[in-house]
């Protein structure tokens, strides 16, 4: 990044400390290939669309149901779907990052 002779910003110092901490903990990082970056972007775009879809469907269902207890049940179902989709997305991105996909 910068040469070691000049003064360093607080960001550069913090990044050095984090890299040193990772090295001590045995954490390694690798640079993602363009193909991996594209795959991650594709996964994120897919799940972003799915999350938007369930949001729209949820809102349309909630507007048609006047009963608060039924709305609560729909909200719980919607939250569970969001959590499931988010977890799937994160697992797939992690697999790509780890070179497993």
Image (cartoon, rainbow, N blue to C red):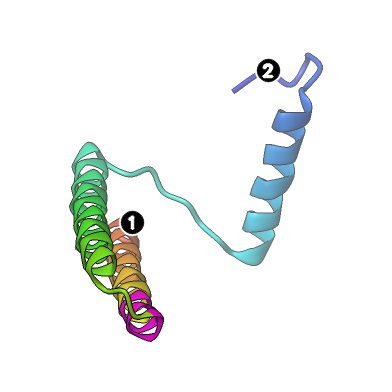
- Residue name at image x 20 percent, y 51 percent: 49
Q: Residues within 10 Å of mark 2 (few under 14, many from 20)?
A: few
Which image quadrant is residue 41 in?
top left
Give the residues drawn in magenta, as a range.
68-75
- Tell whether 74 sits left or right of 28: left
- Tell whether 30 sits left or right of 92: right
- Tell whether 39 sits left or right of 9: left
- Residue name at image x 76 percent, y 23 percent: 9
Is residue 74 a member of the stretch shown in magenta?
yes
Q: Residues within 10 Å of mark 1 (few under 14, many from 20)?
A: some
The image position of residue 70, as x and y in percent, is: 32, 83
Q: Which mark is residue 97?
A: 1
Above or below residue 50? Residue 87 is below
The secondary structure that dominates the magenta segment is helix
Q: Which mark is residue 3?
A: 2
The residue closer to the viewer here, 71 or 35, is 71
């Amino acid at each position: 990044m910068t040469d070691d002779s000049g003064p360093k910003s607080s960001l550069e110092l913090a990044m050095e400390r984090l890299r040193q901490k990772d090295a001590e903990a045995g954490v390694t990082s690798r640079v993602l290939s363009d193909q991996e970056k594209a795959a991650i972007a594709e996964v994120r775009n897919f799940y972003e669309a799915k999350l938007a879809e369930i949001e729209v469907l949820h809102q349309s269902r909630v507007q048609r149901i006047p009963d608060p207890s039924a709305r609560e049940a729909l909200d719980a179902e919607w939250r569970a779907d969001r959590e499931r989709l988010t977890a799937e997305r994160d697992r797939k991105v992690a697999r790509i990052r780890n070179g497993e996909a």
